């Protein structure tokens, strides 16, 4: 039985992703998977803001091809945005894509197979007793009352060609901070009671914003909401670290 690592919000920082995975012994210097039985979950937002989003997609998909049962990826709001702009370039997706750090190079490199891959990305997953999701939001519950049901609903919406339905998926995934504040532990408990798991692990809301400190001061994941929630996005795009976090 191997261990489980999570990383999130790479936002185009391919060199950083290579570095943290190499440091953990999960890949070698030739981008070959050396993680054996280790599980790696990438919690979305591979693209936008940073230098090489399409390179991150290529790299992660290559690792998935080498270790399909070990390397898994969740859908982030930026994948939904990239997909929305790709499919519906003449809608409000275009302006939002640019505003949120979209790069023409990423779109240009997107193959038909990549588009099909993004449309099938799960929105959430269970890893042992952890509930993995990109966004720190209860909006997932609108899509179902189990992980499988949520994923089936989102996949069904993204498989379709209704721009509004795609937009609704994107918009829901932009929500945040639902587990922060005085009511956070109760909200997190309700999500876990419905969807299963003992602890939520999420990216999306950078740790610096949850702690109200500059991202450069962030050194590791943040456990909060009475220990029910772990935030792992160190805020790489904001000058923080790309965190690769081992789940014990
Ligand atoms: Mn996000």
Image: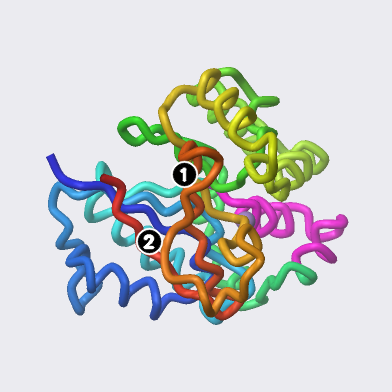
Q: Is residue 220 left or right of residue 189?
A: left
Do tag 1 and tag 2 residues touch (Cβ < 8 Å)?
A: no
Circle on res. 67:
none
- The local crowd at label 2, few if under 14, some if 14 to 19, many if 20 or more residues have their Cα within 10 Å, is many
Which residue in the protein does label 1 denote? Answer: 201
Location of the N terminus by quadrant is top left
Region of the chain picked out in magenta, as a range? 75-97
Q: Quadrant of residue 181?
A: top right
**Residue located beneath label 2 in the image:** 60
Is residue 91 left or right of 196 when viewed as pictured?
A: right
**Does the magenta stretch mainly form a helix, a strand or a loop?**
helix
Could you tell me which secondary element the residue under label 2 belongs to?
helix
- Where, quadrant-wise, is the C terminus in this rendering? top left
**Magenta residue check for 39:** no
**What residue is rendered at 48% in x and 76% in y?**
13
Regarding mark 1 in the picture, which secondary structure is present there? strand
User: Which is nearer the eye, 179 or 235?
Assistant: 179
Residue 205 sits in which quadrant? Answer: bottom right
């Amino acid at each position: 039985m191997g261990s489980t690592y999570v990383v999130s919000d790479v936002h185009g920082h391919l060199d950083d992703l290579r570095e943290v995975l190499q440091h953990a012994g999960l890949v070698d210097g030739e981008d070959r998977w050396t993680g054996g039985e280790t599980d790696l979950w990438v919690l979305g937002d591979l693209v936008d803001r940073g230098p090489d989003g399409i390179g991150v997609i290529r790299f992660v998909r290559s690792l998935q091809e080498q270790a399909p049962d070990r390397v898994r990826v969740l859908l982030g709001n930026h994948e939904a945005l990239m997909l929305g702009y790709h499919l519906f370039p003449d809608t409000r997706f275009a302006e939002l894509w640019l505003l949120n750090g979209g790069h023409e190079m990423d779109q240009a490199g997107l193959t038909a197979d990549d588009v099909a891959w993004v449309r099938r990305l799960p929105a959430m997953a269970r890893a042992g007793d952890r509930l993995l999701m990109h966004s720190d939001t209860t909006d997932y519950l609108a899509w179902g009352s189990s992980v499988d049901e949520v994923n089936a609903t989102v996949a069904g919406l993204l498989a379709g060609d209704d721009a509004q339905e795609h937009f609704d998926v994107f918009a829901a995934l932009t929500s945040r901070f639902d587990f922060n504040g005085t009511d956070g532990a109760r909200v997190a408990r309700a999500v876990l009671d419905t969807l299963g798991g003992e602890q939520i692990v999420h990216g999306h809301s950078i740790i610096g914003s949850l702690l109200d400190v500059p991202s450069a001061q962030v050194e590791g994941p943040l456990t909060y909401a009475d220990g029910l929630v772990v935030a792992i996005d160190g805020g790489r795009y904001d000058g923080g670290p790309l965190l690769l976090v081992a789940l014990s």
